[in-house]
């Protein structure tokens, strides 16, 4: 599409498009400089909520003013382009570096299934596990449901390789609307992360209760560990523990922070 202003567009629409171009340009430049950090959020086991079982490392891009650029401002556009693959490479490299610095840590890192065939990404992974096989056993790769279901054959081949290294695989945003259960039957994910839209206010929402139980039942049928995302209240956490969800993640147990929490652990004693 031409950069010309679309005829009959409103001033607000023009301003949004202009801001989008600025954001994508800033993100692209930051990624080329490897200007990024991980923000870490704890995931706790239902039976041991006072300590983190592992952490999710969430990429945070830093623009040239030092601002952390919100993911929502660029990931939808970047996901289907090479910029998305470069962001995945940066996220993986930061995650592997973090694992190398703390040998007791277990960490999950996000990726798109589209990165499976991106040479820089897969070569970074292979080189790392070759140099440090023990790191592989502490790494969890989270693949978004939407991307996994879009290329099931590639994901299956990838699973066979990386699980052979000892890496665990998680299906992220499970239930968000893209699942083909025919493919899910053939996948061998180690864990399923139930999308937050079903978890928020679950203690008071009968519809979410029914849907979450159904998703949990599917996951357990296929011997997949369950993680509830977006747990924000004590009531929701209690309900999820009672129905047998394996792990919990959300602001109730800790917000993402760029300061590694395991170096100065937050108090979970009241959880």
Image (cartoon, rainbow, N blue to C red):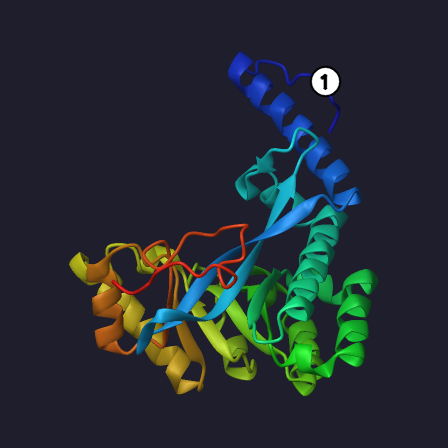
Viewer-proximal residue among 152 and 201: 201
Report the number of discs.
1
Residue 174 visible, this angle = no
Indicate the quadrant where residue 109 lies: bottom right
In the figure, is residue 61 to the left or right of 241? right
Measured as percent of width and height from the top left, residue 195 is found at: 40, 60
Viewer-proximal residue among 249 and 75: 249
Indicate the quadrant where residue 76 lies: top right
Measuring 72% from the left and 43% from the top, which residue is drawn there? 35
Measuring 52% from the left and 80% from the top, which residue is drawn there? 190
Residue carrying label 1: 4
Measured as percent of width and height from the top left, residue 169 is found at: 57, 75
Measured as percent of width and height from the top left, residue 28 is found at: 74, 39
Within 10 Å of the Cα at label 1, are there few (<14), some (14-19), or many (20+) other Cα atoms?
Answer: few
Measuring 29% from the left and 65% from the top, which residue is drawn there? 269
Which structural element holds mark 1?
A: loop
In the figure, is residue 149 to the left or right of 119? left
In the figure, is residue 176 to the left or right of 72? left
Indicate the quadrant where residue 29 lies: top right
In the figure, is residue 38 to the left or right of 131? left
Residue 134 visible, this angle = yes
* Quadrant, the C terminus: bottom left
Q: Is residue 271 above or below residue 60?
A: below
Viewer-proximal residue among 110 and 259: 259
Measuring 35% from the left and 55% from the top, which residue is drawn there? 197
Q: Which residue is the extreme one toward the front? A: 264
Q: Is residue 61 above or below residue 167?
A: above
Measured as percent of width and height from the top left, residue 156 is found at: 65, 78
* Quadrant, the N terminus: top right
């Amino acid at each position: 599409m031409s950069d010309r202003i679309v005829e009959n567009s409103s001033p607000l629409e023009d301003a949004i498009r202009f801001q989008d171009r600025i954001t994508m340009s800033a993100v692209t430049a930051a990624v080329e400089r490897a200007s990024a950090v991980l923000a870490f959020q704890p995931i706790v086991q239902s039976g041991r909520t006072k300590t983190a079982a592992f952490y999710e490392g969430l990429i945070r891009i830093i623009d040239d003013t030092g601002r952390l650029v919100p993911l929502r401002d660029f990931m939808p556009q970047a996901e289907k382009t090479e910029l998305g693959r470069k962001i995945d490479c940066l996220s993986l490299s930061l995650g592997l570096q973090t694992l190398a610095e703390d040998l007791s840590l277990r960490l999950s890192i996000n990726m798109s299934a589209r990165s499976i065939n991106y040479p820089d990404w897969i070569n970074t992974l292979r080189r790392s596990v070759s140099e440090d096989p023990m790191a592989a056993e502490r790494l969890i790769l989270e693949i978004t449901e939407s991307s996994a279901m879009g290329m099931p054959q590639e994901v299956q081949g990838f699973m066979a390789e990386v699980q052979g290294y000892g890496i665990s695989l998680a299906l992220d945003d499970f239930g968000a609307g893209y699942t083909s259960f025919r493919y899910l039957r053939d996948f061998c994910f180690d864990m399923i992360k139930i999308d937050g839209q079903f978890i928020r206010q679950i203690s008071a929402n009968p519809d979410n209760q029914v849907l979450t139980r159904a998703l949990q039942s599917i996951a357990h049928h296929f011997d997949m560990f369950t993680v509830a995302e977006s747990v924000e209240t004590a009531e929701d956490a209690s309900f999820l523990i009672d129905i047998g969800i394996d792990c919990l993640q959300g602001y109730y147990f800790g917000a993402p922070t760029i300061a590694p929490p395991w170096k100065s652990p937050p108090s979970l004693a009241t959880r």
